[in-house]
Image: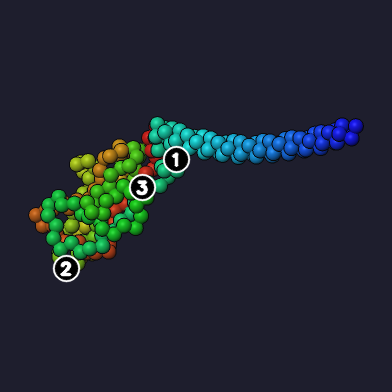
Amino acid sequence: MSFLIIHIFFMCLLGSSADTNYEKYLEARLSQTETDVKDLRADLNLLKLQNDALLEALGSQNTKEKRLLLGPTTVHQQYVTFYVRLGKHYTTLNDQETIIFDSIVTNAGQGYDKYTGIFVCPISGFYQFAATIVSDGGTDKNLDAELMHNGKQIAHLHATLYGNDEGTQIANIHCAQGERIWIRHLQGATDARSMPPGFSSFSGALLHADSP
């Protein structure tokens, strides 16, 4: 009889220990599941951020492509203008030599090249160009130049033989993208070949761009 009681007692202990181990197992599995859920949520948030970034980049690229297809924007059109001055002293000028205005004051749109003296139209449209030449003092000779558009004269500038006289011209013309505008010396039989620094100037601005 006592043996039976002892056996039942040990069986109860073993049963209690098994229940405890099973509860610990369940708790461990639950904790691991919660950790896995957190990791999945973190991965999902990361994927969402990456997806948003890709959508934004794609939208920006589409916008750029649309701008290229539609042509120059209104903001760009408003800032095509340049104003340059003659900073150096020309002591000699050949016939039809390009006068290089080397001092840049404004060059929005980067159409003017101070190394060649040529403005290349970045946008097709109607432009206004202006130029002033000033003769050198003491030469007693006229100074002549011409405003050129792709090899054709569109305006003649003339400063008289009286020293430090000036000749000015303004012209409104249509200029296609890539066409060139510049000022060149026009030498006559009695013309001067020199220009003083700091007085002569050359400028241009887009008045209205062509429709895309």
Whether tag 2 and tag 3 are in contact, CB under 8 A, the answer is no
- Residue 64: x percent and y percent? 43, 36
What label does residue 138 carry, if any? Answer: 2
Looking at the image, tell me whether mark 2 or mark 3 is earlier in sequence order.
Answer: 3
Q: Residue at x 53, y 38 (%)?
A: 50
- Residue 151: x percent and y percent? 19, 41
| Left or right for 106, reference 196 | right
Callout 2: 10 Å neighbours few (<14), some, many (20+)?
A: few
- Residue 201: x percent and y percent? 28, 57
The kind of residue on which mark 3 rests is: Gly
Pick the residue in front: 166 or 210. 210
Q: Residue at x 22, y 41 (%)?
A: 150
The kind of residue on which mark 1 rests is: Thr
| Left or right for 211, reference 167 | right
Looking at the image, tell me whether mark 1 or mark 3 is earlier in sequence order.
Answer: 1
Q: Secondary structure at mark 2?
A: loop
Callout 1: 10 Å neighbours few (<14), some, many (20+)?
A: few
Q: Nearer the viewer, mark 2 or mark 3?
A: 3
The residue under label 1 is 74
Q: CA distance from mark 2 to mark 1?
A: 49 Å
Q: Residue at x 21, y 49 (%)?
A: 146
Q: CA distance from mark 2 to mark 3?
A: 39 Å
Q: Nearer the viewer, mark 2 or mark 1?
A: 1
The kind of residue on which mark 2 rests is: Gly
Q: Residue at x 21, y 43 (%)?
A: 153
The residue under label 3 is 109
- Residue 101: x percent and y percent? 25, 56
Q: In which quarter of the view is residue 85 placed?
A: bottom left
